[in-house]
Amino acid sequence: MPTKKVLIILSDATSFPLHNTSSGTQQQPTGFFLPELAKPLSKLLSAGHEVTFASPKGLTPKPDPNSESLLAFAGNFYERKREQELIERMRRENGFSSPRPFASISDEELKSFAAVFIPGGHAPLVDLGGDKELGRILRYFHGENKPTAAICHGPLALLSTRVTSEGNDSGEFAYKGYEITCWSDAEEKVMETLLRGEIEKCESQLRDAGAVMVEGGREKLGKTTLCRELLTGGNPLAAEELGERFVRMSHRIPRRRRKAITAVRVLDHARVVRGHGTPVSVAGHEGGRGSGEGEEDGFEMHFI
């Protein structure tokens, strides 16, 4: 397979606000969640792809301290070591310590990227959902039907597509009506109990913006959700599957959207298509969670 360029979106935040604690609002350490970045990243590199890291201001990314604990790796010392070494390799060889500021990536340069990926950790709650430049970047990938993946709190970054050129969030949410899985409100409430405070909810914000949230037992155990060009997962258990499916998606050649479809749904193995006009291309599928198996990832019917 030819080399593809993949843009990886990171947060500059190293802490997030924990509200209503015994001493008011406190800052809780955070950053990228190591397994949620390293597992998909490893699969992209193994597939021969070139990666570029970018963040709002280009600050040095920091890992979430909890993501480097052995608990995050179910006690697997060697797996943690491999993933930490991968990030160190990216620091040495791939500019990981100095990500590209979003504003430095022009509309013309965006055309050179085949896909975009947003890992999790609580950091995206702080500086990604309201970033105007990130909104510009994600609207490009959405408009071109290019593979887009996000995991855990990463999907919150999709809300940036609402931010207008004036910097307010009164614009249209590009992923309205999409099925999305993220770190659920129920999972966040467990974190609130452990940390003894209140945290902004990713799931609720996406639902309020018009997303169709998919948060069942399968998703808690690591199943991913595919809807059109967007692949999402809810927690670190989804990192392996998300990486595998995202690599398969990145190998396809996207077709730009033409006119809107009346409805395209994928229900397990049966596909029901209702629309007007003649189907002229297949470039990504719209619809449900998918099984995580096969090479169907990202297909959608276009009508003229």
Image: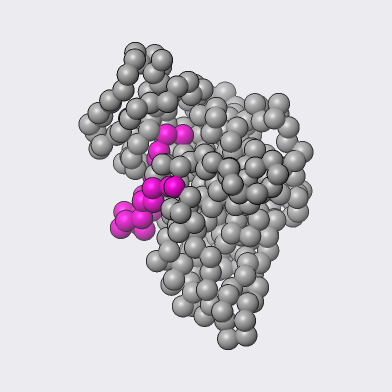
Residue 15 visible to the viewer: yes
- Residue 223 placement (x, y as % from top left): 36, 49
**Magenta stretch containing residue 16, yes or no?**
no
Check the image and report above or below for 242 versus 115.
Answer: below
- Residue 222 placement (x, y as % from top left): 38, 53
The span shown in magenta is 210-229
Quadrant showing the C terminus? top left
Check the image and report above or below for 41 versus 299.
Answer: below
Residue for point 38% across, 33% down: 286
Q: Quadrant of residue 137?
A: top right
Left or right: 60 as drawn, with respect to 238: right
- Residue 7 placement (x, y as % from top left): 63, 38
Check the image and report above or below for 133 versus 13.
Answer: above
Residue for point 58% across, 75% down: 19
Residue closer to the observer: 262 or 299: 262
Give the number of marks: 0
Residue closer to the observer: 7 or 175: 175
Residue for point 75% across, 41% down: 103
- Residue 227 placement (x, y as % from top left): 40, 38
Left or right: 208 as drawn, with respect to 129: left
> Furthest residue to the left?
270
Residue 47 visible to the viewer: no
Residue closer to the observer: 44 or 125: 125
